[in-house]
Image: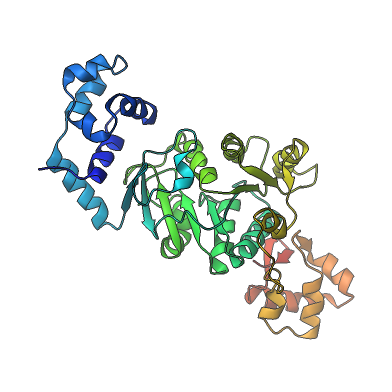
Amino acid sequence: MELTKEEYWYWLGSIKQVGRKTARKLLYVFEDPYELFNASKKALRDTGFLTDVQINNILCRDMHDIRRTVNMIKNRGINIVYLSGKGYPRRLENIPDPPLVLYYKGAAIDNESPSAAIVGSRKCSEYGRRLAYDIAYELAAHGVRIISGMAYGIDGEAQRGCLAAGGITQAVLGCGADICYPKSNIELYTMIERNGSIISEYEPKTMPRPGFFPERNRIVSGLSDIVAVVEAGEKSGSLITVDCALEQGKDIYAVPGRITDAQSKSCNMLIKNGAFLLETAEDILDALKIEHKNNKSINKTENKYTLATDEKIVYARLGLEPKHIDSIVLETGMPAEQVMRIILSLEMRHIIQKTANNYYVKGV
């Protein structure tokens, strides 16, 4: 019984205690997984860099078990692509340390359309959350794929904005493609699977580990033409994505923030060190040489709903920064009871949202 190329590559990526770097060194010696699979114990020892444990793990090869496992993976709706094989994203082939094998759920991994990674802090502000959503929405409305990590905060909001615009988004996970992490993003996970791709280099059923997330960031940047950072603290993991992007020769865009905001420190630092300033989606569209549509997609809330005159007055006083209801009363000149009634009505219709006690922003 002969295995398929796909099955040989799956086996290579699944050998216990043989990581990517060792696997790549093996490919220099044996040319492809087929040659490695059929190598003798002496040939493995002669490489000079394999431990006895690694040699034994390579020699514990069972064709029936490999075929059964691959079939089980496929029956669960998970696809497998391998380096230089059909369906493998060409954008990743030339990055340093490309993944040898990728697993994905959903649509085939798009490699042709323009793309942008939008990343940032998990503990983002409402301002950053709204901005990530709006920028992704507008980019997606112009046919730009959004790449991110489906994490809390900026990542998830950017992908929600993309989906709301009917766009395509790809999530790169730090666990198996069949595991939703964080669990609270299960709705987003399901939506991405239906309208994009869930991607991982880790074998299905692999649970998330801290070291996997920095590793997956090179894939996030590798799939993208541009990397945009919306909000990032001083030690944000987004900076790892930035470092990967710079190593890959990608342009970096960053949203400026107030110098007193902890979540703006890295963005301001990036701009100071030469990153492009990101104010609107048009900055990225210009870089990708995509013509802007005449009709604006962002800030469409007022057109989506029919607002009464007094509701429009209150809504107009809100922005991306949380505002206390007392300030709204003062700015509108309306009685407090009337403002409270309008606020409640707008909130129930998801036109605005509460961020803290008596503080409100325009809704996403």
Q: Is residue 78 visible?
A: yes
Q: Is residue 310 left or right of residue 37?
A: right
- Which residue is painted at 70% across and 85% down in the image? 306
- Which residue is painted at 28% across and 33% down in the image? 32
Q: Residue furthest left?
A: 1
Numbered circles on residues, count: 0
Q: Quadrant of the C terminus?
A: bottom right
Residue 101 in picture, x, y percent from top left: 35, 42
Of residues 275 and 317, the one nearer the viewer is: 275
- 152 relative to 203, above or below: below
Residue 228 in picture, x, y percent from top left: 64, 48
Q: Describe the colour scheme in one phrase.
A: rainbow
Q: Quadrant of the N terminus?
A: top left
- Which residue is painted at 37% across and 38% down in the image? 100
Of residues 334 and 141, the one nearer the viewer is: 141
Q: Is residue 316 left or right of residue 140?
A: right
Q: Is residue 153 visible?
A: no
Of residues 218 and 269, the one nearer the viewer is: 218
Q: Quadrant of residue 56?
A: top left
Residue 333 in picture, x, y percent from top left: 90, 75
Q: Quadrant of residue 208?
A: top left
- 314 relative to 282, above or below: below
Q: Quadrant of residue 50?
A: top left
Residue 2 in picture, x, y percent from top left: 13, 42
Q: Is residue 252 left or right of residue 114?
A: right
